[in-house]
Image (cartoon, grey):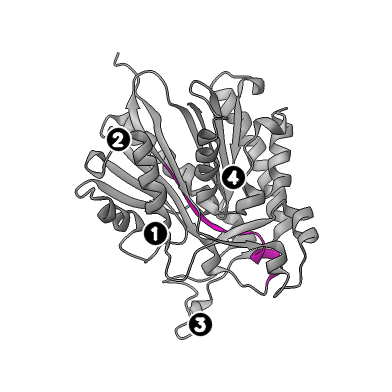
Amino acid sequence: MSERIYSRIAGTGSYLPEKVLTNDDLAQFVDTSDEWITARTGIRERHVAAEGETTCDLAYQAAIRAMEAAGVTGADLDLIVVGTTTPDLIFPSTACLLQARLGASGCGAFDVNAACSGFIYALTVADQFIRAGTVRTVLVVGSETLTRMLDWGDRSTCVLFGDGAGAVVLKADRETGILSTHLHADGAKKELLWNPVGVSAGFKPGEKNAGVRVLMTGNEVFKHAVKALDSVVEETLEANGLDRHDIDWLIPHQANLRIIEATAKRLDMPMDRVVVTVDRHGNTSSGSVPLALDEAIRSGRVQRGQLLLLEAFGGGFTWGAVLLRY
């Protein structure tokens, strides 16, 4: 029997645009307040991409930092997978645009769109390629410019999102790495959190921004998210024969502090073992998990050998988890 191959995180990186938009800034042009936003979401500020700064620009900055940490160059990459729901273009993919900037010509490159679960999905895909033995070094990125698709007059959505990117370099390893991945979706609930336009449906020629915007039924999304994340956490623990107390760190999607706290409570995990960035980043969609992961590693909180549980929930609905030994 052949020895199992794992996908080990060899390096991480992240990037946030320079511009910071606080809750007080938002209150200048929408009917809201710092108190209202913080009480309901835990968000105090978020970063906003500059004019002309694209999803690929953010992805590139995060990618080069992850590659430097891993000690690899573009020529070393066998595959690039980018999780995003806000690509620069319909085609070519953001991954292809990123590949050109990194000098990684010839390797496979594609995007994965699973909304806020995009990085979890992308990491799972990359892990499967490494497990199959077809590649050895993969760059996985979650990058978003969600603020480009917001209705800034809709306080139920515009206060939630920010821009940012995170990246990891995975390398094939015989000893440690990703232990299991778990993906789920429920397209029947799409209209609880969605963007109602696209290329082949809902597009209205001549309409400003083609009507692109985020629509969300917040209370329903909250209930479904908590239930789905509870379920996938239990599934992950059972699949690996683990107890919830075996987890060293929970690194969740940063959408809402109340959802994060509910998941931590389910795990009986104190909040000082949960990585929280939502207060400073807002919801960066597929960028949120790798951003939080990179921050936790670079701050020294997450150490080699520790057991990490990554999880996310997003529009689709999509949700999933990754358990890994860092």
Give the number of the disc on residue 57.
1
Name the residue type under label 2: Thr
- Lower sequence index among marks 4 and 2: 2
Give the number of the disc on residue 208.
3
Q: Tag 1, which secondary structure?
A: helix
Q: Tag 2, which secondary structure?
A: strand
Residue of label 2: 137
Report how far apart the C-alphas of labels 1 and 3 lie in the structure: 24 Å
Mark 3 neighbour class, 10 Å CA radius: few under 14, some 14 to 19, many 20 or more: few
Q: Nearer the viewer, mark 1 or mark 3?
A: 1
Q: Tag 4, which secondary structure?
A: loop
Q: Nearer the viewer, residue 11 or 319?
A: 11
Rendered residue at 29%/56% (across/down): 96
Name the residue type under label 1: Asp
Magenta region includes residue 196: no
Report how far apart the C-alphas of labels 4 and 2 lie in the structure: 25 Å
